[in-house]
Amino acid sequence: MMNHSQAAEEFTHDVDRTTWHDKTLWFVREKRDKAVFQIPEWEALREAASRIKHNALSNLDEYLLEFEQNAINNGVKVHWAADGREHNEIVLQILRETGATQMVKSKSMLTEECHLNEFLIEQGVDVVDTDLGERVVQLAKEPPSHIVMPCIHKKKEEIGELFHEHLGTEKGASDPKYLAEAARQHLREKFLTRRAALTGVNFAVAETGGFVVCTNEGNADMGAHLADVHIASMGIEKIIPKAQHLGVFLRLLARSATGQPVTTYSSHFHRPRACQAMHIIIVDNGRTTQLGRPDFRNSLKCIRCGACMNTCPVYRRSGGHSYHNAVAGPIGSILAPNLDMRKNADLPFASTLCGSCSNVCPVKIDIHDQLYKWRQVLAAEGYVDSSKKQGMKVMASVFANPKLFRFSGKAGRTMMRLVPFSVSNPLNPWYKQREMPEPPKESFREWYMKRSSKEQ
């Protein structure tokens, strides 16, 4: 597996794609800003959402048990899974009990995290993702690259070729309306013939035992309402205390994600309809470990809007697949090391720490601060490359000694001026995609001291 910097370098080889990817995501970020500026109480909503989530996390055990009891009272079967493996086995058991060998699935980052599709396919179950973007990447045999826009890395011409190969559309056709209609016809047959449907859960309400699924395509509703079995996969952090709190989060979610006032479909599920079975699988998969880390527990407030990805200069220019994790971008770089420090030690370093992610987060997660703290943890635990660690120690020594700092700066400027090849060469990673600046004749300190002496 390539680390982030290697995968990012591969992504940026295609300059046109990198530029297009960057501009497309920034366009979504600008839509978010326009939607936000229309809400005078936006900051109050963010603060309210953050406090509600803080309360929920602080009393998580009580709210989960309350949710379970109310869901059972509603006629829902509740299951608990300690990890992704147990979650997948529960899903398989439910399918086998009902005799279902085919299933439609709406978007669920939890199931991506648990690698559910691969598991079920190995067990002989035909799984069809019904979110349009998810279906595209499924046909391409790729994971999603964004939690809201799964195939944002693909151009319409590439999607047209995929649909020609798998759905029989006209070769060379790339009109979005034509492709969307082809997908609609293709998926309609799946909805009508599958006996089992799986959805994610955006919000679970402890007070009622109900849950909410937010989509823009209505595919979750089609699957859940036509199937004999509805399975809902839910991370423990999705819980909120009361139904009245939903209004806060629904006003924040779509605006932060795509700049919409609200998702097209915000579907509320409380109980199975007549002759239907409804199951909720409540999954931990490392979340309680993260809850027990004081510096990182706030990451569990995340409502999966993707705003931090849309604004992140590193994500926009390196692509979601460079993060080799179900959830990419800044928030994924906080969540992933909690699951496996060794495998994901590179991700907290895939950031400029500019703070833009924290500024746009609708639940006020201190994302850039947590990225910085993860770097410290990973270094202390020995998961940082030894050359990088030694380099940081040298830099720390230089910065801590004013005389050595001034000498090093002067030596560096002299070398750049007399022997430019010492820095302008392929061995310098900074030089690979940049032109090194002309070395200044003097440092800022030297300029400032001269200026001060003249004024005196």
Image (cartoon, helix red, strand yellow):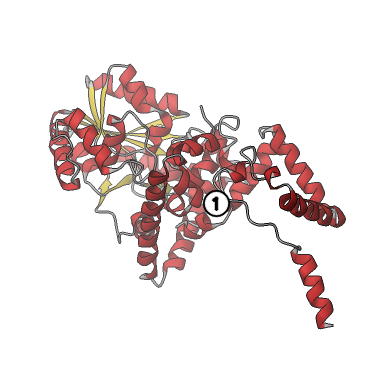
Spot occupied by residue 414 in the image (x, y as percentages of width and height): 77, 53
**Residue in the picture at 17% in, 31% down:** 167
Secondary structure type for disc 1 = helix
Whether residue 373 is visible: yes
48 is higher (above) or lower (below) than 216: below
Whether residue 295 is visible: no
Image quadrant containing the C terminus: bottom right
Q: Is residue 88 left or right of residue 421?
A: left
Q: Amino acid at mark 1?
A: Ile
442 is higher (above) or lower (below) than 150: below
Which quadrant would residue 132 be assigned to in this image? top left
Q: Is residue 382 left or right of residue 317?
A: right
**Residue in the picture at 38% in, 22% down:** 89
Spot occupied by residue 305 in the image (x, y as percentages of width and height): 40, 50
- Give 416 or 55, whichever is nearer the viewer: 416
193 is higher (above) or lower (below) than 400: above
Which quadrant would residue 366 be assigned to in this image? bottom right
Spot occupied by residue 2 in the image (x, y as percentages of width and height): 52, 30
**Which residue position is annotated with label 1?**
367
**Residue furthest out toward the top:** 123
Q: Is residue 414 left or right of residue 47?
A: right
Spot occupied by residue 211 in the image (x, y as percentages of width and height): 32, 45
Residue density around tag 1, few if under 14, some if 14–19, many if 20 or more, within 10 Å: many
- Give 154 or 287, whichever is nearer the viewer: 154
**Residue in the picture at 22% in, 19% down:** 99
**Residue furthest out toward the right:** 403
Which quadrant would residue 151 be assigned to in this image? top left
